[in-house]
Image: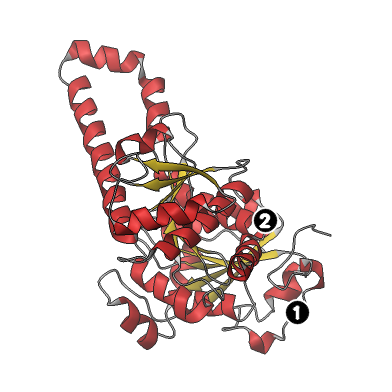
Amino acid sequence: MLNYASRTGKPFSRVPAPPVAAWPGKLSHGKSLILETGLNRMRLAIDAMGGDYAPKEIVQGINRAVNAFPDTAFILFGDETQIRKELETSDRVAVIHTDEVISGTDEPVRAVRRKKNSSMVRMAQAVKDGEADACISAGNTGALMASGLFVVGRIEGIERPALAPVLPTTDGRGFVMLDLGANAEAKPEHLLQFAIMGSLYAEKVRGLKNPRVGLLNIGTEEKKGNELTKKAFQLLKETDLNFTGNVEARDLLEGAADVVVTDGFTGNMVLKTIEGTAGSLFSMIKKVFMHNLKTKLAAAMIKSELSGLKNIMDYSEYGGSGLMGLNAPVIKAHGSSNANAIYNAVRQAREMVQSDVTGKIKHAIQQLEQK
């Protein structure tokens, strides 16, 4: 018997199997995934049509995950014909055909409401109905946030869910930053909730004991910043979190904190700045090393070191962005995710389910409200 719990709080082996008719589609071989995979497996729902390289890279990532995680079953939503061209045979993978796709240009809320048979919405519905324990999509970010909010649902007491990726640091340790775009505006109380959720994630999923929590600001002094950061600072000071104070953007990649909180508008600009700077820097390095024979020889001599540096800054090694504050783990993989990124997003989702991050967030918010 597996020793982790489902969203019902019971071991997976005790979760009753729903009737076949309860599934949002029918497997091509007409069998229930539950009957086929056993009752003690974690189940992950996957939007196979989301992302720039879907479904090929999505499915190839799942193929790798199937081999790596024998305790996990997968439900892939999307165009069955396209999916099966890439899918390796396994009795732990079900394909549910959908005939709609939410594109990157669709208006998020309208698409979620109108495209009920899209791969993304059906994926989220499977989580809501208890047919999956978590879900992953590399599709439209706004639509996934809307699906998470309107379909999966928000934890009671959480005022705003937050997008929380792990960003790289120079020492390879990385840090959790939230919110990076789920909410353009925030109140001090929202930043407090972000800090609680981020700290739990860093501890339970990333394995960091007593993670350091920092507040993104324009200076490290307590009185720095605007009304939002000043009030948030005071709230964070009064908690049991390991709050280390304000951190500046220039220190983020040096590992100034394990968890950094900010509003979604600021966070998204920081994220895009880091991505753009890293991309430009690597382009300039490549241009220098390809300049002439001498520099090409130098590049050949340090090729492995350069590859190691690139891996440290590679988003695909860190999984996806968890949408914190929902009733189940929802993972937003990067839009240009390759198979490796999807594999790591699966690993991330499994760790969130196994660690019961959602349940621990619920408990922490209940305690906060009682104070």
- Choose between 287 and 232: the one closer to the eye: 232
Residue at image coords 44%, 64% = 189
Are discs 1 and 2 less than 8 Å apart at CB?
no
Residue 278 circle label? none
Q: Which one is in front, 5 or 225?
A: 225
Q: Residue furthest top?
A: 294
Residue ranking furthest to the right = 1
Determine whether the residue tagged by mark 1 lies in a helix, strand or loop. loop
Residue under label 1, please give it: 17
The 10 Å Cα crowd at callout 1, few under 14, some 14 to 19, many 20 or more, is some
Q: What amino acid does circle 2 point to?
A: Ser
The location of residue 333, given as percent across then percent down, is 43, 57
Sequence order check, earlier mark of 1 and 2: 1
Q: Quadrant of the N terminus?
A: bottom right
Of tags 1 and 2, which is closer to the observer? 2
Residue topped by disc 2:
355
Regarding residue 52, the answer to whether it shows in the image is no
Q: Quadrant of residue 256?
A: top left
Q: Amino acid at mark 1?
A: Ala
Secondary element at image label 2:
loop
Q: Position of residue 270 (x, y in %)?
A: 29, 48
